[in-house]
Image (cartoon, rainbow, N blue to C red):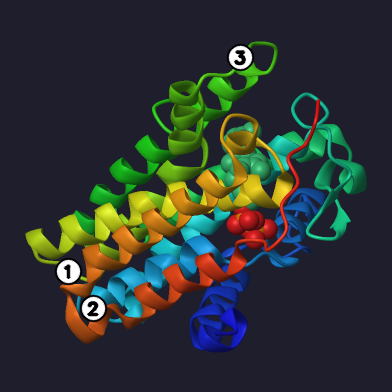
Amino acid sequence: MKYENYFKNYIQLIEKTLNEILPQGNQYPNVIHEAMRYAVLHGGKRFRPVLTLAAAEAAGGKTEDARLAAAGIELIHAYSLVHDDLPALDNDAVRRGNPTVHKKFGESIAVLTGDGLLTLAFNVLSQISSAEKAVRLIGEISTAAGSYGMIGGQVADIESSDRTLSLPMLDYINIHKTGKLIKVSAVAGAVMGGASPKGFQHIAKYGELLGLAFQSIDDMLDGDGYLQLMKIREVRQKVRDLIAQAKREVRVLGKRSAKLIALANYLLERMPKKVHAKVD
Ligand code: GRG
């Protein structure tokens, strides 16, 4: 399956929505709006918003109804990348094949770009037409992105960098730093699609399993993380098991879960054939 073709309609809806919700570059003060658009609109797989739309469909809803939720989550993802690339964190010069935001716009604008994107995300979520769903999503997403979620994982990652890493600590880092935002992408779709309580449980569990698989595959691509503590074939098997379990969770929803199954299969295909563990 070619991801970009299979999810073409979803990706088009996501790009259109992001383009609409981001302030125009000619809005004063222009530089922050140009930088926010630069950070979001130049590439990226859109994995998290695609997951939100697929989850809404699996829940029995319309993808269109989940577009603001999907876009809000992608803004938060984009902010995390801008801040993570900063000299104070990873100090990266290139992101998605382009100069990072601080390389192009300077460090102070890059800090503010991340702040602007995170703040805009919650404004977008507040525009969801059902006030009840909007409030629910704001609660779920702020928890997943905050110090009990992504930020907590990032902090644990920083604290572990000069220590010997244990497997439980690496699990904590991955579940929080990457997993929580991916899980909440599925949860947001389930809420917007009006999932039944049982459907909700299955989709949320699927999101949790997919989040862990996503980070494990990223580790294989980078030769890092789990590869420092487990054998390559063990990591490979772990990914296969996580994805098989994720698919079992949503198969009970029937034909509506086809896109979630395809997304899980896409992750499996992303797993590199050749893997080399980094040596520090
Ligand atoms: C708030 C500073 C800060 C950090 C939060 C998410 C995160 C922690 C940091 C981003 C850096 C990173 C490599 C995190 C691991 C998650 C991950 C693999 C991100 C890349 O996501 P993709 O592959 O990227 O979906 P694209 O470019 O496709 O959107």
Specify the amino acid type for callout 3.
Answer: Glu
Query: Relative to residue 223, is residue 256 depicted above or below?
Result: below
Q: Residues within 10 Å of mark 2 (few under 14, many from 20)?
A: many
Q: Which residue is mark 3?
A: 159
1 and 2 marks in contact (CB < 8 Å): yes
Quadrant where the N terminus is found in the figure: bottom right
249 on left or right of 90: left
- Relative image position of residue 177 (x, y in whole percent): 51, 36
Q: Residue at x 68, y 18 (%)?
A: 161
Mark 1 residue type: Gly
Residue at the spot 42% in from the left edge and 33% down from the top edge: 149
Closer to the chain start, of discs 1 and 3, is 3
Q: Position of residue 97 (x, y in %)?
A: 85, 60
> Tag 2, which secondary structure?
loop
Q: Secondary structure at mark 3?
A: helix
Q: Residue at x 73, y 60 (%)?
A: 27
Where's residue 248, x and y in %? 24, 66
> Viewer-proximal residue, 136 or 209?
209
Give the residue pinned by disc 1. 194
Tell me the tag on residue 231: none
Q: CA distance from mark 3 to mark 2?
A: 42 Å
Q: Which mark is residue 61?
A: 2
Which of disc 2 and disc 3 is earlier in sequence?
A: 2
Residue neighbourhood size for the residue with mark 3, other residues' Cα within 10 Å, grouped as few (<14), some (14–19), many (≥20): few
Label 1 to label 3: alpha-carbon separation? 40 Å
Q: CA–CA distance between discs 1 and 2?
A: 6 Å
